[in-house]
Image (cartoon, rainbow, N blue to C red):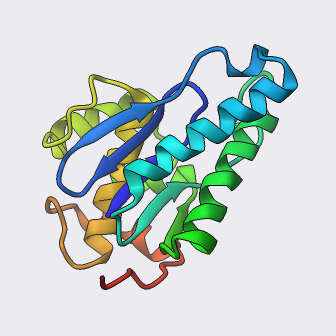
Amino acid sequence: MAGVDLSLTSTGIAFSTGHCLKVGRADVTTLPLATRTEALRAMADEILLHLETANLIVIEKFVLARGRAGTGGAGERAYLYYLVVDALIHQTHTPVAEVPQATLKTYATGRGNAPKDEVKDAVAKRLSMFTTRGNSDMCDAAVLAAMGSDQLGHPMVIMPMAHRKALDAVTWPEAKTS
């Protein structure tokens, strides 16, 4: 079981074992086109390598602007997202659950509009088995992993009911059994 928050510079990956890591590179949007697509494919391959044994992937849903002033790297983020999701679903046949950011925040904090720092604090408090070093993407991945474990009947921690209601907002595929 793994949670994934895709990012060009620091994709967060967390496993139900409590292991957490990040993958990414800072300069991908400034590379020449051919080099950029190669770099994105290499990033996708690295991410997929880490996920090869997962029986369920819970991934933060891609959104174009994420409320930012601009959409820098939006095309590259979309390409990376769909490279990874397509490979998981159609090549490795790994079930993928897509979780909107507000649903992730609700599970972590009880509020869908919680700021990033509140999510980080919630992870430090409730999901301290994850070493996220305060990285927002790793914190989000930890919440996603916890959501997936909870959905599979193996909650990592006891979550308040108001938080657990977020699970009902997700379309859950059946996890692989082998």
What is the x, y in percent for residue 15?
A: 28, 53
Residue 17 position (above or below residue 124): below
The residue depicted at 70 percent of the width and 54 percent of the height is 82
Q: Is residue 8 visible?
A: yes
The residue depicted at 39 percent of the width and 44 percent of the height is 13
Q: Is residue 111 visible?
A: no
Most foreground residue, 67 or 35:
35
Number of numbered discs: 0
Residue 50 position (above or below residue 136): below
Image quadrant in which you'd find residue 147:
bottom left
The residue depicted at 39 percent of the width and 70 percent of the height is 56
- Which quadrant: the C terminus? bottom left
Most foreground residue, 50 or 132:
50
- Which quadrant: the N terminus? bottom left
What is the x, y in percent for residue 92?
A: 51, 70
What is the x, y in percent for residue 139?
A: 35, 37
What is the x, y in percent for residue 133?
A: 27, 23
Most foreground residue, 91 or 79:
91
Farthest right residue in view: 33
Residue 150 position (above or below residue 77): below
Image quadrant in which you'd find residue 120:
top left
The residue depicted at 75 percent of the width and 21 percent of the height is 29
